[in-house]
Image (tube, rainbow, N blue to C red):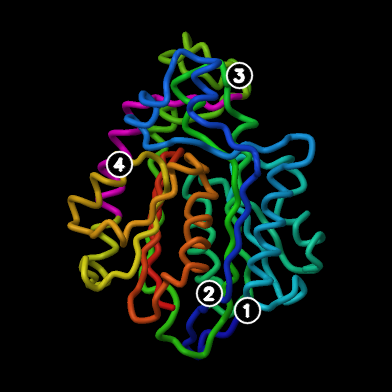
Amino acid sequence: MSSDLPACGVRICGTGSYVPERRMTNEDFAKILDTSDEWITQRTGIRERRICDSARESTFDMARTALERALECAKMKGSDLDLIIVGTVTPDMTCPSVAARIGAAVGAVPAAAFDVSAACCGFVYGVNLAQGLIRAGMFRTIGVIGAEHMSSIVDYTDRSVSILFGDAAGAAILQRDPDPRIGCLYQTMGADGTGWHSLYLPRQERDVPASDADNPIRLGKIRMNGREVFRFAVTKFREVLEDAMRHTNLTPDSVGQVICHQSNLRIIEAARERLGLPQEKVHINIDKYGNTSAASVGLSLDELWRAGKIERERPFVMVAFGGGLTWASSVWRV
């Protein structure tokens, strides 16, 4: 790789997403658990979430469709891609990667392909990696996908976690552009593994720490300490967003959109009010889809992109935080 590459920008060429047709409402949960629509809505902001038909929908299926729609939006073919990155914690198989199978399905062979496991930060991690690889001259056109089949790892006999999650996929096509002024203006990625036990997916008894030994959630299903995660998310979300805006000199007036991981409406609203951001600049869809983990930011980006709300004049910010514990930001000018 040459060390004297000309400066370049990174263009978002198109976006796509996919959500299953099946809706699981709060009323549906009230039929099987000791809960209510009011209880769930007040604590999370969620009213319904989409759930895969496991007989015909998987992480691969959702991710492929989201990427195909992004390619169509960008007026490209799969063969135009030279790398595919999939952010997911619910791969159908650990080998091969979801990304490799998608490459074959969309005609992207021999494009490179790999999955990223960064929980709810998976899509933003993928976007940050992709833009860096493009600017380094290693790749020209990259498809980034966040896709999660969260219903496959949720214990529906447990009220504390099962009400939060839904299934979805979101994708974006990134491409090298000669204009160095467009693309990612600033990014962060971080993790604190000392808090891993706050949100984790144990496969065997030895994976369970002594402090969580009495947890009734079955092995192979996601477990969460709600209070610890809420405390981390409220603090880290605000810190990461403030850091991104400070380093790019963005203000509530000059920022276009803030696209944040849809974890909990109370967390999002607390950060929005702290920063003085108008409601119309902070995208909310958690009421319709719940927490879709790595798909969350990509799905939101696609909704805004297709609605014409991503403006050339105003940079937008993507922010995510999740299991690991992980966090990430990405500020973009299109």
Q: Secondary structure at mark 2?
A: strand
Front position among marks 4 and 3: 4
List the residue tagged with mark 4: 267
What residue did someone put label 2 on?
A: 12
- Determine the image quadrant of residue 1: bottom right
Q: Is residue 190 visible?
A: no
Q: Is residue 333 above or below residue 118?
A: below
Residue beneath the point at 32% across and 33% down: 230
Write the residue at 72% across / 48% down.
60
* First of labels 1, 2 by sequence position: 2
Q: Does 322 appear above or below 128? A: above
Quick one: label 4 or label 3, which is nearer the N terminus?
Answer: 3
Residue 246 at x, y percent in the picture: 22, 66
Kind of element beneath mark 3: loop
Q: Name which residue type carries label 4.
A: Ile
Disc 2 to disc 3, C-alpha distance: 40 Å
In the rendered view, tell whether residue 107 sits above or below residue 117: below
Question: Which region is colored magenta?
Answer: 221-240
> Residue 219, which numbered label?
3
Q: Which of the marked residues, 3 or 1, is nearer the chain's N terminus?
A: 1
Residue type, numbered disc 1: Arg
SS majority, magenta: helix
> Between residues 138 and 93, which one lies in front from this camera angle?
93
Residue 95: give x, y in percent of width and height.
Answer: 76, 44
- Residue farthest top in this picture: 214
- Membership of 233 in magenta stretch: yes
Query: Quick one: label 4 or label 2, which is nearer the N terminus?
Result: 2
Residue at numbered disc 1: 140
Distance from Cα at disc 3 to Cα at disc 1:
42 Å
